[in-house]
Image: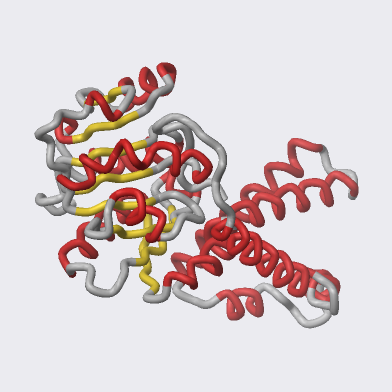
């Protein structure tokens, strides 16, 4: 982490918030430079155990009036954001920039509540961030200072890889492919497990085979440098078992078509949610930030 990105204020101590905090501390952020706002007492205790020395408080009122954060990071559920943002306007005014990890909320939602002059970077991470293997896509409006873009990317690299988009509308597709994507993979593991059970495998063995096959294939894909199509061809012998299975998966209406339909549905719902006025009111920090 570059030295200027401190102190930090993190609003939300759920799974994503906790993963970010641990990643920042592992990359050199001093615990005393990290402020976390989490209203749930149990979560505060857990965070305190995982990040000794971090300043973990229950609400915005406990943030010192003279604290000028390098970044004010929101990692809460989208349905509670509108209810809590106005109280953060004074802190945002003292902050170098705001980093959003709130699914479905555009930059405009923040500038409306915090002031048009607020510098906002929007992100869409995914749940593998919890083990440092996340994929985060970032968006910053035109005119965002380069040093802010660099700082925002550095914060998100603490939990995995990063990429940028220049058109905020593309975040719907990003959400459908990457944000929701881990759920598709988990469903694949469930389906492989059930298929093994139907063929007579012991349930525990079927689960182990499915989990390690998917996890190992993902690691091979990342570490080999080959693209997915080349790796698929490498394991598919003409006339063999894999070819027989792929013939089913790739037929019309099969996995390829179903996945395209599923991702399109997710992107469509992302657009719908972005256009809906949130009417849920909640508490600061009550959520995960990357739920899709």
Of residues 121 and 89, the one drawn nearer to the viewer in this rendering: 89
Give the image location of residue 175, x and y in percent: 54, 61
- Determine whether, in the image, residue 282 is placed left or right of residue 271: left
Taking depth in this image into account, of 113 and 209 the one nearest to the observer is: 113
Q: Quadrant of residue 125?
A: bottom left
Taking the spot 48% from the left edge, 38% from the top edge, the residue there is: 80
Residue visible at 40% across and 32% down in the picture: 284
Q: Is residue 62 left or right of residue 39?
A: left
Place of residue 3 in the rendered image (x, y in percent of width and height, measured from the top left): 10, 50
Q: Position of residue 266 (x, y in %)?
A: 65, 62
Residue 155 in the figure: left or right of residue 66: right
> Where 262 falls versus 228 (above or below)?
above
State how the image is colored.
secondary structure
Q: Position of residue 290 (x, y in %)?
A: 48, 48
Residue displayed at 30% across by 43% down: 23
Quadrant of the rendered structure where residue 257 is?
Answer: bottom right
Q: How many marks?
A: 0
Q: Is residue 250 above or below residue 81?
A: below
Q: Residue at x 27, y 59 (%)?
A: 116
């Amino acid at each position: 982490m570059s030295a200027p990105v401190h102190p930090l204020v993190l609003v939300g101590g759920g799974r994503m918030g906790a993963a970010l905090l641990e990643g920042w501390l592992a990359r050199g952020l001093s615990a005393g430079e990290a402020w976390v706002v989490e209203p749930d007492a149990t979560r505060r205790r857990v965070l305190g155990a995982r990040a000794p020395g971090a300043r973990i408080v229950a609400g915005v009122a406990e943030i010192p009036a003279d604290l000028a954060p390098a970044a004010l990071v929101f990692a809460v559920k989208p349905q509670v954001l509108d209810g809590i943002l106005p109280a953060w306007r004074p802190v945002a005014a003292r902050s170098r920039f705001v980093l959003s990890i709130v699914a479905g909320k555009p930059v405009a939602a923040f500038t409306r509540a915090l002031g048009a002059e607020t510098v906002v970077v929007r992100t869409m991470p995914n749940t593998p961030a919890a083990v440092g293997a996340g994929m985060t896509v970032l968006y910053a409006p035109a005119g965002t200072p380069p040093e802010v873009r660099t700082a925002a990317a550095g914060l998100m690299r603490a939990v995995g890889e990063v990429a940028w988009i220049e058109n905020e509308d593309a975040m719907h597709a990003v959400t459908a492919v990457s944000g929701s994507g881990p759920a598709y993979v988990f469903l694949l593991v469930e389906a492989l497990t059930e298929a093994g059970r139907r063929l007579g495998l012991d349930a525990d063995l079927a689960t182990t085979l499915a989990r390690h096959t998917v996890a190992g294939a993902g690691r091979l894909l990342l570490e080999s440098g080959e693209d997915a199509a080349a790796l698929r061809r490498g394991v598919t012998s003409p006339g063999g078992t894999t070819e027989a299975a792929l013939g089913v998966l790739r037929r019309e209406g099969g996995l390829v078509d179903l996945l395209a339909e599923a991702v399109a549905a997710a992107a469509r719902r992302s657009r719908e949610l972005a256009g809906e006025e949130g009417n849920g009111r909640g508490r600061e920090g009550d959520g995960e930030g990357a739920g899709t």
